[in-house]
Image (tube, grey):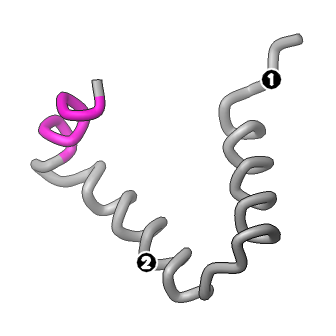
Amino acid sequence: MDVPLWLALLAVGVLGIKLVRPPWWLVTLLLLGGYLIAGSFLGPAVDSLIN
């Protein structure tokens, strides 16, 4: 069964928020920070560290 990546990430995110119950400001900060870092000059550096 092939599941799109966005659907798998959405399911993991919803389950994580329901089970761990982090504050909403932390969730927003992580999402916004990840989006901004991915679009900046730090994106390739973070990508090379992850891979």
> At 18% across and 54% down in the image, what residue appears?
40
10 Å crowding of disc 1: few (<14), some (14-19), many (20+) = few
Left or right, residue 48 beside residue 8: left
Q: What residue type is labelled 1?
A: Val
User: Which is nearer the eye, 20 or 9?
Assistant: 20
In the image, residue 42 above or below residue 45? below
Left or right, residue 18 beside residue 46: right
Dot 1 falls on a residue whose secondary structure is loop
Residue 13 at what x, y percent from top left?
70, 56
10 Å crowding of disc 2: few (<14), some (14-19), many (20+) = few
State the image quarter where residue 44 is shown: top left
Residue 36 at what x, y percent from top left?
30, 62
View extreme (top): residue: 1
For the residues labelled 1 and 2, the Cα–Cα distance comes to 27 Å
Residue 34 at what x, y percent from top left?
37, 59
> At 72% across and 61% down in the image, what residue appears?
16
State the image quarter where residue 20 is shown: bottom right
Q: Name the residue under label 2.
A: 29
Q: What residue type is labelled 2?
A: Leu
The image quadrant where one finds the N terminus is top right
The image quadrant where one finds the C terminus is top left
| Residues drawn in magenta | 43-50
Q: Name the residue under label 1.
A: 3
* Magenta-colored segment: predominant secondary structure: helix
Residue 42 at what x, y percent from top left?
13, 49
> At 82% across and 14% down in the image, what residue appears?
2
Magenta segment includes 48: yes
Magenta segment includes 32: no
